[in-house]
Amino acid sequence: CQIVKGFAYSKDGMHAWNLVKLDDAGHHLLDLINEVLDMSRMEKGQYALEENEFDIEQVLSECMEVVKGDFSEKNHIISLNFQGLKHRDVIADIEKVRKVFENILSNAMKFTPNGGKISINLKDEMNRLPEYSTFEFTVEDDGIGMSDEFQRHMFEPFSREQVSLDASSDGMGLGLAITKNLVHLMDGNVFVKSRSKEGTSITVTLVLKTSAGSRRCSA
């Protein structure tokens, strides 16, 4: 048998380990290809909004579990707060809202070191438009943060900060560009506060229609 990173593997075990790594690489490549295709469609104006009725609290919780699973070995301390959420049931494009949630959560977990803290908050306030509410989604971490220089062009396609935690943090620099385009497509805004080596806070605001009979959450 062979010794790999302090563990003994038989030939069968090594073969299985290689298959897992190959599968991970395949998923990573597929994600990169999908990001390039998404960016291309946005630049050509080929993205259209759909209307779905869904529970926004449930969607965010599901996104957090999916993304957290990709970084389970980092043992982040994660807090999820819905105390300011007054309406759960909304009418919007569920896949685009889900993509925004997942991109921001993934960035926070990717660039926060082992054992770091990540806080997630979702709340809403009544909007001047009848049957609409302004939703505010914020993710704050104590990760590596971003330099002032990078923040000046962080939403440009293929922009990447030179400093990263490790090789697994590498990407094509499309996540933030896609997120901003999706948010703007839904007439929302993205706000970023970050300091190098101190952490990052990203807030997305979206004005969404609340469905008739929407469940109200206790404040």
Image (spheres, rainbow, N blue to C red):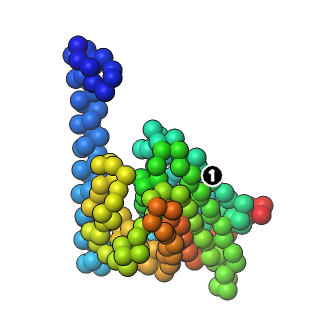
Residue type of the residue flagged with mark 1: Ser
- The image quadrant that residue 162 belongs to is bottom left
Measuring 45% from the left and 38% from the top, which residue is drawn there?
A: 73
- The image quadrant that residue 35 belongs to is bottom left
Measuring 53% from the left and 49% from the top, which residue is drawn there?
A: 116
In the displayed structure, 113 sits above or below 98; it is above
Q: Which residue is mark 1?
A: 79
Residue 134 shown left or right of residue 184 in the figure: right
Judging depth in this view, the residue of 209 and 6 nearest the camera is 6
Q: Position of residue 118 (x, y in %)?
A: 56, 54
User: Quarter holding the C terminus?
Assistant: bottom right
Residue 168 shown left or right of residue 136 in the figure: left
SS at circle 1: strand
Judging depth in this view, the residue of 210 and 163 nearest the camera is 163
In the displayed structure, 4 sits above or below 196; it is above
Judging depth in this view, the residue of 71 and 37 nearest the camera is 71
Measuring 23% from the left and 29% from the top, which residue is drawn there?
A: 18
Q: Position of residue 5 (x, y in %)?
A: 31, 27
**Mark 1 neighbour class, 10 Å CA radius: few under 14, some 14 to 19, many 20 or more:** few
Judging depth in this view, the residue of 190 and 73 nearest the camera is 73
Total numbered labels: 1
Q: Position of residue 77 (x, y in %)?
A: 58, 46
In the displayed structure, 25 sits above or below 171; it is above
User: Quarter holding the N terminus?
Assistant: top left
Asked if residue 38 can be seen in this view, the reply is no
Measuring 56% from the left and 74% from the top, which residue is drawn there?
A: 205
Q: Position of residue 199 (x, y in %)?
A: 51, 62
Asked if residue 22 can be seen in this view, the reply is yes
